[in-house]
Image: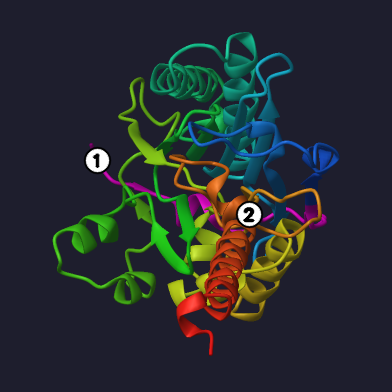
Amino acid sequence: MGSSSRQAGREPSEEPTIPQKRRYTLNLSSEKKKDSLLTHSGYDPTIALIASASDIGRVRTINQDECGDFQHPESGVRLLLVADGMGGHRGGEVASQMAVRRMGEVFQEDSTVEPSRLLEHAFNEANQVIFERSSNESELAGMGTTAVALLLDGSPAATLAHVGDSRAYRMREGQLEQLTADHSVVGELVKRGQLSLEEARHHPQSNEILRALGTRNEVQIELTPIDIMRGDRFLLCSDGLSGMLSEPQISEILSEGHPQEIAEKLIEEANQAGGMDNVTVQVVVLPRPKSEDGITRAPSDGKNPGAAAAGPWLRWAITLILLAGILALLLLGLEDPANSP
């Protein structure tokens, strides 16, 4: 598929535009369900702590990013989205909003469909509505958007889908992993080993993407199943973040704190690094299980759920039995007639 450059589509408009304020969204409904725990066979998607934030940056005059957090009212399945639009005076803004809205609608219609099929259908629907509108309205011609989506359905494996260079990361046990590969010119060079991630950030073609929603009648979607563990932290972001901060910087911020604090800090650091683009983030934390006393416990291996809790008491009981046995032997020895004078 041909290259689709975002550089022209992201230039500030010639007409004066009032800069958009920063947008924050925080989902704390899960905090009300403190007695809900992740299970060994999966997890409850409603307990995920999620925060999102979007900022116009220091250079642009229009925020062409969009994000969405959808939860199905019956199944509790969660769909998280980040889209980064491109195209003319207002095309990018329209495209990203259309993508998030249409994918959310498809998700709400039926979240019980197999995850990869659901995401593929949602992306194709978004691609079609954007392409049709750009074909019918000359001022929106050529508009399109990247998109990255994370579907949490309660099974041990979540599902990612993406088009373009909006990314997904996972933080696990202190290690940051990029879960998506950029569909871009420099992304291909990184894949071939011709560029490092750091070199790709500063490459002159870093803004040229190879896939986008809405620029063609059909789109190639990349679907990625990923395993889920208690304590995992996920980040979805536009390239306004990944283009400004290195992986070590992202890792340090994502490693601890509440999702809202993390989201705000990521945007603050991206702006301090130059804020050359709109920046949008979604932060997801799957909390570790807590006992009733509020102390976080290490997860059991599932073979004997009561062993961890019973361990200390069992050791004390065995110790007392051994001591009692030794004392009894000593007393019997004192009473042995053979030892009498």
Q: Nearer the viewer, mark 1 or mark 2?
A: 2
Residue 134 at x, y = what percent? 51, 25
Q: CA distance from mark 1 to mark 2?
A: 26 Å
Span colored in magenta: 1-23
Residue farthest to the front, as pictured: 341
Q: Quadrant of residue 277?
A: bottom right
Which badge, 1 or 2, comes first in the chain's sequence? 1
Residue displayed at 82% across by 37% down = 29
Residue 139 in view of the camera? no
Quadrant that contains the N terminus: top left
Residue displayed at 43% across by 15% down = 114
55 with respect to 162 (left or right): right
Crowdedness of circle 1 by 10 Å Cα count: few (<14), some, many (20+)? few
Residue displayed at 36% across by 20% down = 217
The numbered disc on residue 2 is: 1
Position of 134 relative to 301 (above/below)? above
Residue 201 in view of the camera? yes
Residue 280 at x, y = what percent? 63, 54
Position of 271 relative to 211 (above/below)? below
Label 1: element kind: loop
The amino acid marked with disc number 1 is Gly
Residue displayed at 55% across by 78% down = 330
The amino acid marked with disc number 2 is Thr
Position of 270 relative to 292 (above/below)? below
Residue farthest to the right, as pictured: 32
Label 2: element kind: strand
Which of 59/307 is in front?
Answer: 307
Crowdedness of circle 2 by 10 Å Cα count: few (<14), some, many (20+)? many
Residue 233 at x, y = what percent? 56, 55
- Asked if the residue under mark 2 is in contact with the one under mark 1, i.e. CB atoms within 8 Å, the reply is no
* Residue corresponding to mark 2: 280
**Is residue 306 in the magenta section?**
no
